[in-house]
Image: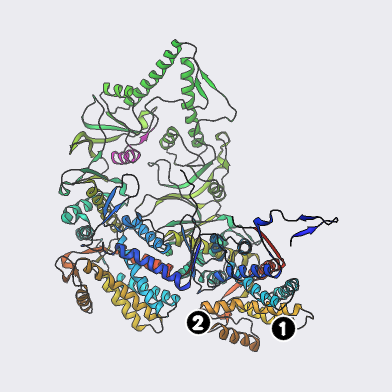
């Protein structure tokens, strides 16, 4: 007697071949989806949100595309996950990792169909991944010691990363921006100190890097618009009515006169507080919370520039930049460290007025102002720039560099092929398949550029037969060329992470032989 | 059917609302139950052993889990069938008791049920089957004891322990770096073990995971990690020789529990109250400073003003630390948890050699490491991995490995794995069966057959010919009188498990057999299933 209801209603269970097929198909569908965005000539996708306003995003950033998808297939979710991790960890290569995992699974499917056990495939893949990693390690170039070369490496990496993005038209300009910004960080990966401000209008070329700090706020009325040698107090304190925080306190009065007295006292208290703040000897006061009209007026009287409602990040960054403390009490002015900068002024970008702090103490921070025709363009530009910044900051730590343009894939494929020839047993099929999956990446890059991929990859393979070649696909001229000469570079860390995460994800999906989907939780009808 | 008559011949209902319930009775009930139990076992069967496959589970909220841990699969499967739920319980109790072998116990129970079905079809009463199983399980239990080996290890010689943990880990997805993980697990257990009392408090080992990096970056930290950052961005990120004040009171104005009102009716009162308030914050911070604390860890939040004062006085602080972590920190640093500022004294401070904040990747994630603690009994295993699923799965695997190491410290008897113990038991039970007169004999023999199911499943999952392999190993065991022969899952070339270093703990194995038998007995004894019908 068969058991009909082992699971709850609506729960589904898929077993063996069917489960494997379902996960292969799901994963490959995702890989195919982002495949066309790979490489310098990759296409963009339009994403329309289902939320209110149906806002539109145009992007070719793999992580952004996948993040916005609503996916039901569990295997596809694994791929979305790895792309997200790749984004968090190294910032770039989010498309490559998904495509590589997809290709690995596509090859695995063929092997499974020819009756090779998934476990054999996995062990083959593992050997191949290890071998590929070693092949990469042998070929890396490390220019950390030579500052000039290192900087040119960074520049090349930034250009390579940006060339596949919307910024490719002005990639030199932006690459310079990104490299300058990252070099200012002096080895820290704290990208928070690079602020990106987007202002529609102008063209992408008008974007610039500013050495100071720009705060998207207005200066209070009647206060000085320009301060030289500013002493800044950065604060996080209530500047509306200072509430009594002791629990249960309340005001009880029995006459109107008393109300006025209390009100007077309150005002007095505020006046005192403002006075204390002014006593710090400052001429600029930045607060995270609101500043009410009354204290603002007092500040204006004292000739102090007061900026209210700077958001939390802004405050932290400002404190970092100007080297001041974030203060909340003002009783001992001598021990609070004030922030300093040479000049505060109001500047105009497009039609907006912003506050510009220049000549700041800490040289780490800087601001990149992006200009562009439309908000979509700006969003995409920000994402691209963010990718470039992430990669650069990681490269500063791990300065090993590889060539780009499908060169690393071919190097790995060659090493893996050799391993396959040496390995006895069924595993060699899997190792061979791994190398095919690696070669698929340059193929896709060529395909996306509308080139004859079969011809190019075959040429590339022949080139790579020689030791020490630098051949890769040059998408711009549509031929096989020397990557070192063209200055196409990639960070080792990105490639390394792509290789490892893709193998791990493929392995995970391969190991599954049963999918159990629980009944979806019922949403309560709100209507 | 369920109509009965009282002494006056009037009919009355035993079960009310007949039409709303479905009912299965007698042999039908048993058969239905058995097939449900078997269905669950069938799902887990392919996950057994080093070459077992994983299951992908999608929760009601769409979260995906990939695992081959029996207990986790069953837990998340969300079964509806009553008997299936019993099997879930079975695996859970193995998990609680032993922590490993959760798949094996279910497969074992499934095999016992399958054999029982055959016996029932031949007309043997279920109770007799149950009794036979009971007898057989006792024989197997004793036999296991007789083939068990003492397992020698000491703090200086961790190698045997590491090998055992490796056996456990080899069936998981993490087997790529099983060696390093096994070392981590063993070191962690030994760090917290009380070898005198032969006890290990696993609560002292915290397993923390963070997405990113790779599995090889997983590390053992002799200290605690807290997934928090300093309360003020400008506080120092590294403190050496920290004296830690562990507080459970917030840096906020007091909130007496009794309802009260402070009335303000004059300007003077307003001002005194204000000064009081300021003094209050000042006092709190000063108190911490006075006792010599260099780091404050607090369970609650800070007022902005207090936060600034702390920063101002150069007293780094961490806020919103969970209760469990707080306790661990207290244990590790030898400090006391202080519920009130007044009770803060120098003796109650915890000590740690190094406290540092560490940032990860390109995101803003930061964690606080508390290391070189006064009392190094609390340790943390910090797992890194490609994605969340990987980390969850690693956590489960590490948990299994920790449990195995703990069990060995509690009781250092082992049996050999790879199905060898089962085969050996099966031979012993088979031989003993002939001595029993009566129907139980059949049940005992069936039990012996059921024991073969585990090596059989192992062989099947490893891509070997199950029947051929099993019979070869069995005859080898009898011929060579070597009870260490098992299934060679990894194609090493030998099937002597002693050479392959595949162990399992004796109590784990015994527990498996006992628990499986108990559940099967329970299922066999059910002859009436009443359930509300679908509406």
- Chain for disc number 1: B
| Residue at numbered disc 2 | B492
Front-lying residue, A150 or A491: A491
Q: Earlier in the sequence, mark 2 or mark 1?
A: 1
Classify mark 2: residues with Cα within 10 Å, few (<14), some (14-19) or many (20+).
few
Q: Which mark is residue B431?
A: 1
Q: Residue at x 45, y 73 (%)?
A: A17
In the picture, the quarter occupied by the N terminus of chain B is bottom right
Taking the spot 40% from the left edge, 40% from the top edge, the residue there is B232
Q: How is the image coloured?
A: rainbow
Q: Is residue A277 located in the magenta-colored stretch of the structure?
A: no
Question: Which chain hosts label 2?
Answer: B
Question: Residue B349 lies in what quarter of the image?
Answer: top right
The label number, if any, that marks residue B308 in the structure image: none
Residue A342, image x and y in percent?
A: 22, 35
Q: Quadrant of residue A288?
A: top left
Q: Quadrant of the C terminus of chain B?
A: bottom right
Q: What is the CA distance from the residue labelled 2 to the residue labelled 1?
A: 31 Å
The residue lying at 56 percent from left, 52 percent from top is B375
Helix, strand or loop for disc 1: helix
Mark 2 vs mark 1: give the one in front.
1
Q: Residue furthest left?
A: A477
Residue A19: x percent and y percent?
45, 69
Q: Residue at x 25, y 71 (%)?
A: A443
Is residue A505 visible from the viewing direction of this image?
A: yes
Highlighted range, magenta: A307-330
- Which residue is situated farthest in the bottom direction here? B479
> Label 1 neighbourhood size at 10 Å, few (<14), some (14-19), many (20+)?
few
Indicate yes or no whether the magenta region holds residue A309.
Answer: yes
Q: Is residue A497 visible?
A: no
């Amino acid at each position: 007697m068969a058991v009909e209801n082992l699971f709850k209603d609506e729960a589904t269970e898929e077993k063996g071949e069917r489960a494997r097929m379902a996960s292969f198909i799901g994963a490959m569908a995702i890989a195919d989806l982002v495949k066309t965005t790979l490489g310098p000539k990759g296409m963009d996708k339009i994403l329309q949100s289902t939320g209110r306003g149906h806002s539109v995003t145009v992007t070719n950033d793999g992580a952004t595309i996948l993040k916005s998808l609503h996916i039901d297939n569990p295997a596809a979710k694994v791929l979305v996950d790895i792309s997200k991790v790749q984004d968090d960890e190294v910032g770039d290569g989010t498309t490559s990792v998904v495509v590589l995992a997809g290709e690995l699974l596509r090859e695995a499917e063929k092997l499974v169909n020819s009756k090779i056990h998934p476990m054999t495939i996995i062990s083959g893949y593992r050997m191949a991944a290890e071998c590929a990693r070693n092949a990469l390690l042998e070929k890396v170039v490390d220019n950390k010691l030579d500052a000039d070369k290192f900087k040119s490496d960074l520049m090349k990496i930034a250009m390579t990363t940006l060339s596949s993005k919307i910024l490719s038209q002005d990639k030199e300009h932006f690459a310079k921006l990104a490299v300058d910004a990252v070099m200012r960080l002096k080895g820290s990966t704290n990208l928070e100190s690079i602020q990106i401000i987007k202002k529609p209008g102008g063209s992408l070329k008008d974007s610039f890097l500013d050495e100071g700090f720009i705060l998207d706020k207005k200066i209070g009325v009647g206060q000085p618009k320009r301060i030289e040698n500013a002493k800044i107090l950065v604060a996080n304190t209530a500047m509306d009515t200072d509430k009594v925080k002791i629990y249960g306190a309340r005001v009880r009065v029995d006459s109107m006169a008393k109300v006025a007295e209390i009100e007077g006292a309150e005002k007095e208290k505020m006046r005192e507080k403002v006075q204390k703040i002014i006593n710090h000897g400052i001429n600029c006061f930045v607060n995270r919370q609101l500043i009410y009209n009354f204290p603002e007026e007092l500040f204006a009287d004292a000739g102090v520039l007061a900026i209210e409602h700077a958001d939390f990040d802004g405050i932290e960054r400002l404190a970092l930049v100007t080297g001041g403390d974030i203060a909340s009490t003002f009783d001992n002015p001598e021990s609070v460290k004030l922030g300093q900068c040479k000049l505060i002024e109001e500047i105009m970008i497009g039609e907006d007025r912003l506050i510009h702090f220049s000549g700041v103490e800490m040289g780490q921070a800087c601001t990149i102002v992006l200009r562009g025709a439309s908000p979509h363009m700006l969003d995409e530009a920000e994402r691209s720039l963010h990718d470039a910044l992430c990669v650069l900051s990681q490269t500063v730590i791990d300065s090993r560099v590889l060539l780009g343009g499908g060169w690393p894939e071919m190097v790995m494929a060659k090493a893996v092929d050799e391993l396959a020839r040496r390995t006895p047993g069924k595993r060699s099929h899997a190792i061979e398949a791994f190398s095919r999956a690696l070669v698929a990446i340059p193929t896709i890059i060529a395909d996306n550029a509308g080139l004859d991929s079969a011809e190019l990859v075959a040429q590339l393979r022949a080139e790579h037969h020689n030791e020490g070649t630098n051949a890769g696909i040059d998408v711009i001229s549509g031929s096989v060329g020397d990557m070192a000469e063209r200055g196409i570079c990639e960070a080792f860390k990105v490639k390394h992470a792509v290789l490892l995460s893709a193998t791990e994800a493929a392995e995970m999906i391969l190991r599954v032989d049963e999918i159990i989907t629980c009944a979806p939780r019922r949403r309560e009808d709100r209507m | 059917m369920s109509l009965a008559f009282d002494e006056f011949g009037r009919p009355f209902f035993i079960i009310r609302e007949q039409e709303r319930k479905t009912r299965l009775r007698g042999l039908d009930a048993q058969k239905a139950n058995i097939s449900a139990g078997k269905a669950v076992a069938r799902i887990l069967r392919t996950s057994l052993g080093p070459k077992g496959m994983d299951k992908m589970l999608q929760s009601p909220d769409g979260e995906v889990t990939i695992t081959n841990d029996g207990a986790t699969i069953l837990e998340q499967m969300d079964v509806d069938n009553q008997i299936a739920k019993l099997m879930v319980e079975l695996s859970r109790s193995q998990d609680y008791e032993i922590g490993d072998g959760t798949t094996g116990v279910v497969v074992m129970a499934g095999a016992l049920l399958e054999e029982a079905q055959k016996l029932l079809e031949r007309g043997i009463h279920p109770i007799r089957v149950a009794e036979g199983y009971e007898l057989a399980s006792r024989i197997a239990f004793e036999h296991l004891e007789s083939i068990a080996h003492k397992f020698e290890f000491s703090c200086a010689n961790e190698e045997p322990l590491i090998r055992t943990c490796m056996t456990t880990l080899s069936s998981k997805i993490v087997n790529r770096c099983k060696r390093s993980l096994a070392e981590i697990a063993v070191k962690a257990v030994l760090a917290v073990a009380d070898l005198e009392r032969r006890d290990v408090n696993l609560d002292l080992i915290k397993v923390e995971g963070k997405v990113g990096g790779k599995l090889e970056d997983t590390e053992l930290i002799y200290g605690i990690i807290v997934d928090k950052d300093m309360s003020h961005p400008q506080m120092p990120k590294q403190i050496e020789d920290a004296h830690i004040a562990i507080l459970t009171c917030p840096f906020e104005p007091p909130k007496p529990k009794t309802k009260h009102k402070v009335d303000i009716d004059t300007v003077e009162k307003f001002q005194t109250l204000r000064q009081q308030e300021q003094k209050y914050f000042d006092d709190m911070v000063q108190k911490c400073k006075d006792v010599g604390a260099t780091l404050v860890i607090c369970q609650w939040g800070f007022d902005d003003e207090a936060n600034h004062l702390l920063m101002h006085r150069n007293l780094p602080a961490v806020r919103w630390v969970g209760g469990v972590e707080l306790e661990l920190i207290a244990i590790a640093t030898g400090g006391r948890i202080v519920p009130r500022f007044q009770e803060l004294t120098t003796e109650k401070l915890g000590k740690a050699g190094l406290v540092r904040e560490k940032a990860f990747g390109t995101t803003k994630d930061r964690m606080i490491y508390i290391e070189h603690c006064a009392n190094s009994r609390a340790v943390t295993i910090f797992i890194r991995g490609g994605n969340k699923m990987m980390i969850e799965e690693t956590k489960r695997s590490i948990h299994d490995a920790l449990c195995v190491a703990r069990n060995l410290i509690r009781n250092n008897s082992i049996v050999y794995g790879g199905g060898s113990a089962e085969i050996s038991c099966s031979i012993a039970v088979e031989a003993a069966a002939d001595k029993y007169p009566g129907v139980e004999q059949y049940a005992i023999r069936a039990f012996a057959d059921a024991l073969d199911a585990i090596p059989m499943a192992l062989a099947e999952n490893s891509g070997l010919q199950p029947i051929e392999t099993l019979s070869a190993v069995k005859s080898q065991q009898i011929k060579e009188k070597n009870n260490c022969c098992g299934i060679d899952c990894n194609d090493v070339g030998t099937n002597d498990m002693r050479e392959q270093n595949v162990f399992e703990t004796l109590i784990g194995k015994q527990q498996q057999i006992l628990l499986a038998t108990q559940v099967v007995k329970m299922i066999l004894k059910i002859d009436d299933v009443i359930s509300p019908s679908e509406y």
